[in-house]
Amino acid sequence: QYILAIETSCDETAAAIILNGREIISNVVASQIESQKRFGGVVPEVASRHHVEQITMIIEETLEKANMQPSELTAVAVTEGPGLVGALLIGINAAKAFAFAHSLPLIPVHHIAGHIYANELVEPMQFPLLALVVSGGHTELVFMKEHGSFEVIGETRDDAAGEAYDKVARVLNMPYPGGPHIDRLAHEAEEGVEFPRAWLEENSYDFSFSGLKSAVINYKHNMDQRGEEIDPQKVAKGFQDSVVEVLTTKTLRAARQYQVKQVIAAGGVSANKGLRTSLEQAFEEAKISFVVPPLKLCTDNAAMIGAAAAHMYNAGVRGNLAMNGLPGKELKSWI
Ligand code: ATP
Ligand code: MG
Ligand code: FE
């Protein structure tokens, strides 16, 4: 089973071919980071234009690298949402055209299911499973009792973890996307500035990062007023320590309560070195299997969409030519 997968939900134009949901045959990602940098974030209209320019070439390159013809494919998968609607529609229309031209079934994939299934490209999931999803737009704890079954047991009430990283980076005059810069700076400091941790109610698996973000902004403001320079490394470390401690503690507590066999991390922020180290240590001590994808598969890519689509295909999920972009699509079980 060979699935051609397409992902254009944000600022990466990506396509991949996945064999049997587990093996990457080819994986091409064209990032727009360089041109979005000037705006300090993703401008939807700019993203759409880039996707239009790139998508045909990226699909061709993906087939060429795999040395495959469209007739050898089993299905075409594409991200249906969530994401920027204009950006999503470029991928969806490319997928529709390709599927129609080559008489292939279409599979609509949820972007976050894709992030979670990136882990299947590392090793097979073990159920029951807990996924910590930390990305640019999402921070969620998802319980899965089997393939295609998702129960969101906690989520952010305000900013996503990645969003907080990007905003704090801006305060520190770091370019977009800020996550990797904060990560690097944090590792250059011995000690961090003390910032609060948002634990919320005692039993809650929800998250909140806007208070932390405000604390960083206020800290900078107060220092400015006193005419003092901030130490970006100490601020980065203080911020990252707070994010990592809350994410690790809540994930560990949920893993124990739900008695999961495996914990996985997913999404762009799971590329964070501080977070990876903290989660690895916590679950080694707890003797619970922990998996996180290699950095390249943490941020947006189409390989992960193909990995999720393989299971959806086997479960009989199909899209059609009336498919639309669903910018606010919720993570729903497909079984
Ligand atoms: P979503 O998946 O929620 O729709 P998205 O697709 O824009 O959002 P991703 O591509 O999964 O998000 O992740 C991008 C985010 O990951 C950005 O906010 C970026 O700053 C963050 N990020 C990337 N690398 C790191 C890192 N090393 N440390 C912290 N954050 C990081
Ligand atoms: Mg991106
Ligand atoms: Fe993403």
Image (tube, rainbow, N blue to C red):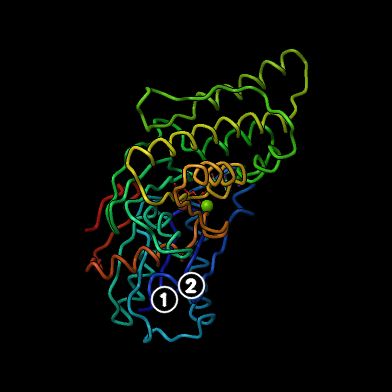
Query: Which residue is at a point 63% across and 48% down the rendered structure image?
Result: 37
Query: Which residue is at a point 36% across and 76% down the rendered structure image?
Result: 98
Q: In the rendering, at what x and y percent does residue 229 appear? A: 77, 23
Whether label 1 lies within 8 Å of ligand 3 gets the answer: no
Check disc 1 and report its element: helix, strand or loop: strand
Density class for disc 1 (Cα within 10 Å; few <14, some 14-19, many ≥20) is some
Query: Which residue is at a point 59% across and 23% down the rendered structure image?
Result: 195
Q: In the rendering, at what x and y percent does residue 5 appear? A: 41, 69
Density class for disc 2 (Cα within 10 Å; few <14, some 14-19, many ≥20) is some
The image's mark for residue 19 is 1
Work out how far the residue at label 2 is from the one at label 1, CA to CA, in angstroms: 6 Å
Q: Nearer the viewer, residue 109 or 52?
A: 109
User: Which residue lies most toward the right here?
Assistant: 228
Q: Quick check: 94 above or below 209? A: below
Q: Quick check: 177 above or below 210? A: below
The residue type indicated by label 1 comes to: Leu
The residue where tag 2 is placed is 24
Check disc 2 and report its element: helix, strand or loop: strand
Q: Earlier in the sequence, mark 2 or mark 1?
A: 1
Q: In the rendering, at what x and y percent does residue 236 appear? A: 66, 33
Q: Nearer the viewer, residue 67 or 322?
A: 67
Residue 20 at least partly seen = yes
On the rendered structure, is 69 left or right of 311? right
Give the quarter of the figure containing the N terminus.
bottom left
Question: Is label 2 in contact with label 1 (beta carbons under 8 Å)?
Answer: yes
Query: Which residue is at a point 48% across and 63% down the rendered structure image?
Result: 122
Residue 42 at least partly seen = no
